[in-house]
Amino acid sequence: MEKFNNISAKIVGTILFGFGIYFFLLVDDLNNKVITLIMGALLLFFGFIIFTRVQIKTISMGLFKLLKIDATAIEKADKKLVDEIRIAEKIINQLQVSNKFKATAIRAQYDYDALEQMNELSEDKSFPSSSEAKIVYDSTLERYDYTGYPPIDYSSTPPIFKNKKVTIDDIQNAFDSANKFEKRQIIGHLWSNSNFCMKDRMSFFIENIQKEKNNLIVAYLGKFFIKATENVAQPLINCKPLEINKILSWWNKNKNTVSI
């Protein structure tokens, strides 16, 4: 209907515009030139107004539709862009988590804090790689639960033990400043030194198990601690040297039973 009205308005405007021109052409033939000029001018004016108004309206409607289409297209494009950005962010986050997991898994081979992170992730079933974390954790426990540790050279006595009046505190100070090789030597010589009661030796192992971060040193401490429990009524069984939580739990329950 609107399209029909626009066409009708254009026709009327054109006719009036034509009559206006016609009256102007008759000016030389009619006596009343003023009236003829006025009528012609009015017809031209109204014809022009009607015609141009319809054109303006048509153009405006066209522009409005075009702008509306463009706005809808822009809105769709924006939504698509937002969705793509979210997908990209999700992929980036997944890659970051994956890369962080791989880096932690590598560090878990020698760093106890990283190994504990693997243990926590293995118990978190919402974590996508929890099964892989468990494999890393279990395999690392197994790797350090063996008899082929780097040997302790008992023929070479650490300097701290050459002092016959050495105390546990002296040994602890020497241990804190020692490198990995020296720490292994200190652990082995303390274990075999009967000048110190078993409870003092076990206390030393427990204290340093909680402080050390190197898996090999922790495993040495854990190994000798587990061996020491064989001398008490309730020995620590089914425990690997790197299972610190089991070792600490046993100590808290049974330390008062260690009297030798």
Image (tube, rainbow, N blue to C red):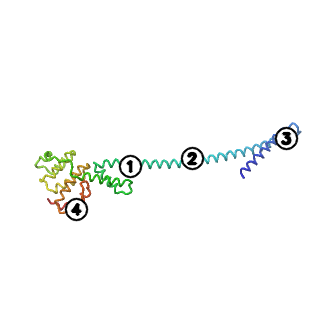
Residue with the most extreme bottom position: 233
Label 2, label 1: how far apart the Cα atoms are? 36 Å
- How busy is the neighbourhood of tag 4: few (under 14 within 10 Å), some, or many (20 plus)? few
Tell me if residue 257 comes above or below residue 94 in the rendering: below
41 on left or right of 82: right
Proximity of marks 3 and 4: CB atoms separated by less than 8 Å: no
Q: Which residue is at the front of the view, 113 or 145?
A: 145
135 on left or right of 189: right
Residue annotated with mark 3: 36
- Tag count: 4
Element marked by disc 2: helix
Q: Which residue is at the front of the view, 102 or 28?
A: 102
Q: Name which of mark 1 and mark 4 comes first in the sequence.
A: 1
Q: Position of residue 172 (x, y in %)?
A: 18, 49
Element marked by disc 4: helix
- How busy is the neighbourhood of tag 2: few (under 14 within 10 Å), some, or many (20 plus)? few
Q: In which quadrant of the rendered view does residue 235 lie? A: bottom left
Q: Name which of mark 2 and mark 1 comes first in the sequence.
A: 2
Q: Position of residue 193 (x, y in %)?
A: 13, 52
Residue in the image at 29% along x and 49% along y: 109
Label 3, label 2: how far apart the Cα atoms are? 55 Å
Quadrant holding the C terminus: bottom left
Residue type, numbered disc 4: Lys
Q: Which mark is residue 174?
A: none
Q: Name which of mark 3 and mark 4 comes first in the sequence.
A: 3
Residue in the image at 22% along x and 62% along y: 253
Residue annotated with mark 4: 253
Residue type, numbered disc 1: Ser
Residue annotated with mark 1: 98
